[in-house]
Image (tube, grey):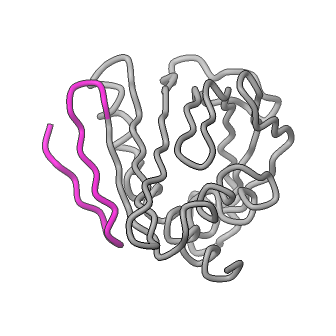
Amino acid sequence: MSDHKAAHSVQAKAEGKTLVMERSFEAPRELVFKAFSESVHLESWWGPKGWQTANSRFEFQPDGVWLYCMECRDENQGEFYGLKSCGKAVFQEIAAPERIVYTDLFTDQEGNIVPGMPEILIEVKFLELNGQTKLVTSSQFSSPEEIQQLLDKGMVEGFSSQLDRLEDYLKAIR
């Protein structure tokens, strides 16, 4: 699979069953980690631009569950307007402020797992570099075809848009 370079400096590379995406932020690592580890912060930036996230459950601890739904509220997004996309994360490992490991699953609005969609093991690393934070997200899939399925659905572009929102949010809360 080839390298993918999305807008706004997100670098993505698929190798075998792993998709790695990276981006740097001009913010301290503790602040970036906080944006990922507190429900109120996540709801403020999680999801692509034009989407609003609501957390119905957020237990930030090993074996804790995070249930969320994102809804497109941007009428300019055409067929996506009004669409909901929901997920369930189960936290496996948390090492503040260095890394978070969780399993991510697609769900319906009630939190039931959607059959036929991939289960993804995600590791998020927060690397401190001279007052900046490099975010490295490694997503493990069960096959290269699963990665391709999500790449075809715009996963890198959506993640890039989401990280643009995170960057704006970090500037606002600094």
Rendered-image quadrant of the C terminus: bottom right
Q: Is residue 83 above or below residue 19?
A: below
Rendered residue at 70%/51% (across/down): 70
Residue 100 picture location, percent across and down: 57, 38
Locate residue 17 relative to residue 124 in the image: left or right: left
Residue lying at 52% horizontally and 22% vertically, measured from the top left: 119
Confirm whether the magenta stretch covers residue 5: yes
Above or below: residue 47 compared with residue 19 = below
Percent position (x, y) of residue 109?
Answer: 78, 35
Q: Nearer the viewer, residue 85 or 36?
A: 36
Q: Where does the N terminus fall, quadrant-wise? A: top left
Residue 121 within the magenta-colored segment of the rendering: no
Q: Where's residue 163, x and y in %? A: 50, 64
- Residue nearest the viewer, comparing 23 with 158: 23
Q: Relative to 35, say whether 89 is above or below.
A: above
- x and y percentages locating residue 144 in the rendered image: 26, 25
Residue at the (67%, 21%) spot, across then down: 113
First to last magenta residue range: 1-18
